[in-house]
Image: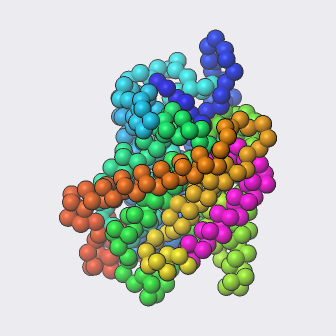
Amino acid sequence: MVLLLSSVPVLAEEAEPQLDTGDTAWMLTSTVLVLLMTLPGLFLFYGGLVRRKNVLSVLVQCFAIAGIMSLLWVVFGYSLAAGEGGRFFGNMDNLMLKNLTDKGLVGTIPESVFITFQMTFIIITPALIVGAFAERMKFTAVLIFVTLWTIGSYLPVWHMAWGGGLFAEWGVIDFAGGTVVHINAGIAGLVACIMVGKRKGFGSAPLMPHSVPFTAIGAALLWVGWFGFNAGSAGGAGSSAGMAMLVTQVATAAGVMTWMALEWIISKKPTAVGVATGAVAGLVAITPASGSTTVLGAIVIGVLSSLAGYFFATVVKHKLKYDDSLDVFGVHGIGGIIGAILTGVFIREGYEHGDGQLMKQVLSVLVTIGWSAGVSVIALFIAKLCCGGLRIDERAEEQGLDTTAHGENAYD
């Protein structure tokens, strides 16, 4: 099993890797923190932004994705992503984790812990996508699409970045998932929301969030959980994790203040949804750079990602008339692109990297965009054929997915 992972620190040569209980304890904690980001963080963040008739549909989608992806990862996903192979895919030698033993290590932590940590990544990535087509896609189509997309896009991009594939050959820096998670999911969300079509009423009337407190609580949980996401990607409890934690906090703070300032200047009223979204924009963009950037770089990355996210959420999607319901592309896609590119600009002294780092980062962004878009179109087309269409009918959309798809009401 080859694990040439940017998320695992390079160790000094030694006769045999040794288990470090401190590193293991931190990685167990990080795993819980990243799972917290989806359940309940993302559900609350997204659930508050949709209308009250669709809040349970987001919950069910997040839970279902957590179940599907956990099983997919252990059955063949981990083998296909992390196994020895070519530039795009690993091999299938570790199906059902048949080579896993309680003695196996990745760096200084048990391989079982690393597998579970990365399982939380494969859970949250397709869960992010559902925000782009929230309130209007058939539940069966959602499950088919995200499963096919994960196999066709998430696993190979993971291998390219962290499994010794194409991006690793180029020397691309993606510490915690700028390409693997955020650009990958953001582009899929854009393609999906266009192919599914706009919600009824989009562009003619505001489609207001039903629970801003839900959204604020969800964003707070994402913020806290992101320390596991980024600092956990160091693979242990060392100085790399400490720096990742610091720059994550700084970039997020910059994202919050930038979004708040824009609302204050433009609409004269800073909003809770705005500061929550600004926080997520900063978190997204710092993800690929969290292991290599400077503090100044983190501030710049947070400011620019929040500026761009605000522009795409409030202007671009309305001008271009695509209904990215919860701004998955505007925040995750655009923030991931900005963060991945600027990772090649702001590199702290002493961090080893090759020449032409900026161009390497740009190329990895372009490959990820093209790969995810192509796989998304194919996966959506297959889901459409299997389900007799991607979209719920007008009656179901009017009544809401909670009752028509799941037979429940969130509120009496």
Residue 247 lies in the magenta stretch: no
| Quadrant placement of the C terminus | bottom left
Query: What residue do we see at 33% from left, 69% from top?
Result: 196
Dominant secondary-structure state across the stretch colored magenta: helix
Instruction: Describe residue 332's horizontal placement relative to residue 405 as left or right.
Output: right
Q: Is residue 241 above or below residue 379?
A: above
Please count the marks in the image: 0
Instruction: Describe residue 85's horizontal placement relative to residue 335 as left or right.
Output: left
Q: Which residues are magenta?
A: 287-314
Q: Nearer the viewer, residue 311 or 169?
A: 169
Coloured how? Answer: rainbow
Q: Residue 15: percent from the left, percent from the top?
A: 64, 11
Instruction: Describe residue 164's horizontal placement relative to residue 281 as left or right.
Output: left
The answer to whether any part of residue 310 appears in the image is yes
Furthest residue in direction top, as rendered: 15
Q: Residue 146: percent from the left, percent from the top?
A: 37, 53
Q: Nearer the viewer, residue 344 or 189?
A: 344
Q: Residue 269: percent from the left, percent from the top?
A: 69, 83
Q: Quadrant of residue 58?
A: bottom left
Q: Residue 403: percent from the left, percent from the top?
A: 32, 71
Query: What residue do we see at 31% from left, 55% from top?
Result: 379
Query: What residue do we see at 66% from left, 69% from top?
Result: 307
Q: Nearer the viewer, residue 363 or 412?
A: 363
The answer to whether any part of residue 124 appears in the image is no
Query: What residue do we see at 69% from left, 21% from top?
Result: 12
